[in-house]
């Protein structure tokens, strides 16, 4: 609805009331971030009053496409991605925006009147692909946006990153409707492989000139100026065959996790030759752990299913790692209630996880690998994927590393910890692969104060400060790229989880803040 004009002239959605004009003055008191300009505020108010339901409807459409990476296909060859891009392009053109499909990258833009190719730009970085979802863990199809009684909009991509795409479209539509004279082109970039492969984006950037100021809509508020480096340790634990007596309990199977950047919600183990005392000890210990456990007698033995809580692996504190806690459950106890297992592949796996990882979040047991940075915080380490491979058990550990150590130093410490464990066990770890992503730290972006001011104004937050996150976004590939939402500080980020959602209220707040921020940035010289 239009904002009421204090002089009682005919209502106009782009006429700022005198009361609203006072707000920037009130917010200049010490401790408050500078408020956005009157132009930014009035266009943001228009966006929220006119396009809230429209952005939800658009999000519903976008969530309907299962845009996860598929083996043997690319966004150029996958028909699901083709349909997704077609739907996105149709919607953008309906809103009066320009669309350019570059295969892996879609560009959706709003240009100043009469602008040429050399006009300055504001970049808005998003992605249209999603992580896989396990349909058995969702109350409905993850690719059907559903709303709960408390206003949660549930679906894969709702928060990461299709919600921000929908919001950005309507922020641009509101700016177009406003008639504001822009000095920069607003260019929404939707990349189709952020979750799986950054190389095509790097190739695209060899010929595409990005904006000199960018915002990424793929993280948290207030403003992200630091990102830990996405890192990984992969290895194979040996296949071990052992003969045991019919009365000896033996651990024959252990696995868990869905993909490398998710804290595992599920894990399973199988024990043969159990006895009542062992089962009682396991059940008693299970009651002390934060996982749900199901004990099922099956022909192959006693199967234990552990259920934790999925989370983005950049925020392991938001999850309950089923793999780590199942290994904790199965680790031998001093009183012998849970025995030293005969050396099987599964037993070696449990010992590795219990000895080098445990249930901590920061690599506390992984030799001397753990460290911390004052701004970015501690390195995190989580077992995210345990699978049966050709040579034994394949283990994937996902890490997020801050600044403070070189890849060479980290590699040396990680290998030393692994070798120390294997030497003590008389076993042999194979196929060790490490990857140490580069942390990002930006301390001089020209639009930092603008974004902080927008956040402070719309959330009534005095003196908001930039933050660092564990996540790794495409911001690393763009100049002066600061992440701006969509998740609120202190709230759990649900992207990559099996209950991903964004709320109606958050979408509306995002629409106000994204609109205001883009007005401020696009009116800059």
Image (spheres, helix red, strand yellow):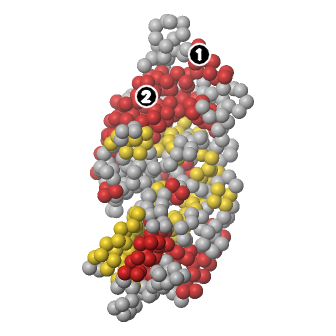
Out of 427 and 107, give the one closest to the viewer.
Answer: 427
Q: Give the image location of residue 124, x and y in percent.
A: 51, 40
Mark 2 vs mark 1: give the one in front.
Answer: 1
Out of 288 and 193, give the one closest to the viewer.
Answer: 288
Where disc 2 sits, the SS reads: helix
Circle 1 residue: 19
Q: Residue at x 41, y 80 (%)?
A: 278
**Would residue 6 be visible to someone looking at this image?**
yes
Left or right: residue 52 versus residue 18 is left
Where disc 1 sits, the SS reads: helix
Q: Give the image location of residue 456, x and y in percent.
A: 61, 33
Q: Give the image location of residue 254, x and y in percent.
A: 40, 75
Question: In the figure, 71 relative to 93: above or below?
Answer: below
Out of 278 and 230, give the one closest to the viewer.
Answer: 278
Picture quadrant where residue 344 is located: bottom left
Q: Residue at x 40, y 39 (%)?
A: 150
Marks 2 and 1 in Cβ contact (< 8 Å): no
Picture quadrant where residue 223 is located: top right
The N terminus lies in quadrant: top left
Q: How crowded is mark 1: few (under 14 residues within 10 Å), some or many (20 or more)?
A: few
Circle 2 residue: 173
Q: Determine which of the numbered discs, if any, sits on residue 348 in the image.
A: none
Distance in Å between CA atoms under marks 2 and 1: 26 Å
Q: Which residue is drawn at 66% across and 22% down?
A: 26
**Would residue 102 be visible to someone looking at this image?**
no
Which circle's residue, 2 or 1, is located before the other in the chain? 1
Q: Give the image location of residue 230, x and y in percent.
A: 54, 60
Q: Which residue is situated farthest in the right direction here?
A: 30
The C terminus lies in quadrant: top right
Left or right: residue 36 versus residue 306 is right
Q: Which residue is drawn at 60% across and 77% down?
A: 417
Q: Which residue is situated farthest in the left direction here?
A: 299
């Amino acid at each position: 609805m239009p904002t009421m004009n204090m002089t009682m002239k005919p209502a106009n959605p782009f006429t700022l009331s005198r009361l609203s004009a006072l707000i920037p003055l009130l917010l200049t008191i010490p401790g408050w971030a500078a408020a956005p300009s009157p132009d930014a505020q009035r266009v943001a108010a228009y966006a929220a009053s006119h396009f809230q339901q429209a952005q939800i409807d658009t999000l519903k459409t976008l969530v309907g496409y299962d845009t996860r990476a598929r083996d043997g296909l690319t966004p150029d060859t996958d028909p699901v991605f083709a349909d997704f891009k077609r739907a996105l392009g149709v919607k953008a053109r309906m809103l009066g925006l320009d669309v350019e499909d570059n295969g892996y990258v879609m560009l959706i833009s709003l240009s100043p009147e009469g602008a040429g190719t050399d006009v300055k730009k504001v970049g808005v970085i998003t992605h249209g692909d999603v992580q896989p979802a396990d349909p058995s863990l969702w109350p409905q199809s993850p690719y059907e946006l559903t709303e709960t009684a408390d206003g949660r909009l549930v679906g894969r991509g709702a928060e990461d990153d299709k919600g921000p795409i929908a919001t950005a479209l309507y922020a641009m539509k509101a700016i177009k409707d406003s008639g504001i004279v822009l000095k920069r082109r607003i260019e929404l970039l939707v990349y189709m492989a952020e979750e799986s492969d950054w190389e095509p984006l790097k190739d695209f950037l060899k010929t595409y000139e990005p904006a000199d100021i960018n915002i990424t809509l793929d993280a948290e508020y207030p403003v992200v100026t630091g990102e830990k480096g996405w890192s990984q340790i992969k290895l194979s634990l040996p296949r071990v065959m052992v003969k045991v007596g019919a009365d000896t309990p033996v651990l024959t199977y252990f696995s868990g996790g869905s993909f490398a950047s998710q804290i595992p919600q599920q894990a399973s183990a199988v024990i043969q030759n159990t006895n009542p005392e062992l089962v009682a000890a396991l059940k008693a210990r299970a009651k002390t752990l934060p996982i749900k456990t199901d004990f099922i007698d099956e022909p192959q033995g006693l199967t234990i299913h552990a259920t934790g809580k999925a989370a983005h692996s950049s925020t392991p504190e938001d999850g309950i790692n089923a793999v780590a806690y199942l290994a904790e459950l199965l680790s031998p106890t001093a009183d012998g209630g849970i025995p030293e297992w005969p050396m099987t592949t599964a037993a070696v796996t449990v010992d590795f996880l219990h000895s080098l990882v445990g249930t901590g979040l920061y690599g506390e047991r992984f030799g001397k690998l753990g460290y911390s940075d004052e701004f970015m915080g501690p390195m995190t380490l989580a077992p995210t994927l345990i699978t049966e491979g050709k040579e034994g058990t394949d283990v994937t550990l996902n890490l997020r590393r801050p600044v403070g150590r070189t890849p060479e130093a980290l590699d040396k410490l990680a290998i030393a910890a692994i070798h120390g464990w294997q030497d003590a066990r008389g076993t042999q770890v194979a196929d060790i692969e490490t990857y140490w992503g580069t942390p990002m730290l930006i301390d001089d972006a020209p639009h930092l104060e603008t974004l902080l001011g927008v956040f402070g104004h719309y959330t009534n937050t005095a003196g908001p400060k930039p933050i660092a996150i564990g996540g790794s976004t495409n911001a690393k590939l763009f100049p002066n790229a600061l992440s701006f939402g969509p998740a609120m500080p202190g709230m759990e980020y649900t992207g990559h989880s099996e209950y991903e959602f964004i709320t109606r209220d958050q979408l509306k707040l995002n629409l106000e803040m994204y609109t205001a921020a883009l007005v401020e940035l696009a009116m800059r010289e």
